[in-house]
Every structure is written in structure tokens, then in C-alpha cells.
Image (tube, coloured by chain):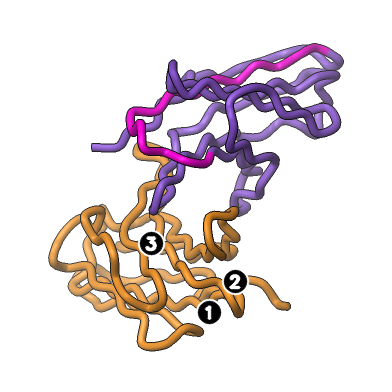
Amino acid sequence: DAGVIQSPRHEVTEMGQEVTLRCKPISGHNSLFWYRQTMMRGLELLIYFNNNVPIDDSGMPEDRFSAKMPNASFSTLKIQPSEPRDSAVYFCAGRAGDGELFFGEGSRLTVL
Amino acid sequence: QKEVEQNSGPLSVPEGAIASLNCTYSDRGSQSFFWYRQYSGKSPELIMFIYSNGDKEDGRFTAQLNKASQYVSLLIRDSQPSDSATYLCAVASNDMRFGAGTRLTVKP
């Protein structure tokens, strides 16, 4: 298996633009998590899905952030409009049952 | 609010020494506990998990769990320069939340 695949790996955009981050989890992983990592705040849980259903989005910082999981093999995290404070590394991770998380390589976002 | 706290570090130990990393958590409903290692610019990777009170050993690594004290620790014996990284404590119930991490440097 190719592991968790995230795209893009790097994105540089200007304030106000829409950003869409994508994730393809490992087949069979029924839970999917989105995290944001910064030096100041560490690894923050934004939202997680079980069997494609959003369970807890209390970590989503503002209405500018939204996430979807239309099927078991694809999820998106969208920021609209983006702001400089959204600059971070965004990780997608999958989990089977109560086991470990398997992380993607991350999407590094820079908002100018 | 579920919180996971780690000793902030940074922690520096000489090669061959024991490195001790600590973590406390607030959610008593937490069921499983993980230690991840993250090298700079990379994604976190699993070192160990522990579900039951007591110690669990895997090579040079020992995880310790005390649910009554809501405390998890990781000991690294015979520390090597390649162990230099940030160590993240993760606590899971239905979700999984991470501490801020402890940066460890092992000096040759």
C-alpha cells in the first residue's frame, strides 16, 4: 500500500485565496483525522471522521475552514478565504479501529 | 477540554545516557496511549503504544502508564544521536490528541 497520500505537498498563496488540501487514506482505515501543526501551537486536531461521517469538528478554528469526506478514499480540507495566520503544516492521518495513526507527509501552506 | 501536557524541554542528554520523557493527560476516559517521534520536516512516526497500566518494553524503549495518576512516560536507554528528534505523546479515546512535544538532543 502506498500509505496516506496528501496533496499538494507545498502551497504558497495570497491572502484571500481559496485553498484546498487533499487526502487519500490507506484502504481499510475507517477513521480519518486532519491536524494542523505550528511551532506555537503544536499538533492541533481540527476534525475527524468515522466511516466518512464527521464526528467532531470543534477544533476547526473558524467558519473559513471546512472539511468533507465524500467516500472512504478521499477527503478535503478547504480554507476560504485564507489568511496569513493559516500558514502551517496540515497533516491527514488514518486509523483502523483503536490502533495507531498513520500520517501522510503533510501539506505545507504559506499564505502571504 | 481534553488536554495533553508534556515536559516542555528541550532535553539534552549525552550519548549512552537514559532520556526520560513525561506526559500527563486530563481525560480519564482515555483508553490508549502512544509515543510518536518526529524528525524536523517529517511526519510523526509511531515508536510505541501502551494500553494497560505498567511498563512495556521494546528494545531500547520503555513506555510506562499510570492511569490513576493520568501519567505516561517514555524512557530511552543507551540514547543515540539518531534519537535526536521531537517526541510527541498522544492520548486516544474516540479521537487522538497530542501534546506539544519534547525536543530531545543526544550529544555524541
- Disc 2: which residue: A4
x and y, in percent, of residue A20 in the image: 35, 78
- Disc 1: which residue: A24
Label 1 crowding class (10 Å Cα cut-off): few <14, some 14-19, many 20+? many
What segment carries the magenta color? B17-32
Q: Give the answer, above or below, for where A80 lies relative to A37.
A: below
Chain under label 2? A
Q: Is residue B72 left or right of residue B49?
A: left
Mark 3 touches mark 2? (CB < 8 Å): no
* Shade of chain A as shown in the rendered figure: orange
Query: In the image, is residue A108 part of the stretch drawn in magenta?
Result: no
Chain letter for the part of the structure drawn in purple: B
Q: Which mark is residue A110?
A: 3
First of labels 3, 2 by sequence position: 2
Chain under label 3? A
x and y, in percent, of residue B84 in the image: 71, 30
Image quadrant holding the C terminus of chain B, namely top right
First of labels 3, 1 by sequence position: 1
Measure the C-alpha gap from mark 3 to mark 1.
22 Å
Mark 2 touches mark 1? (CB < 8 Å): yes
The residue located at (32%, 75%) in the rendering is A53
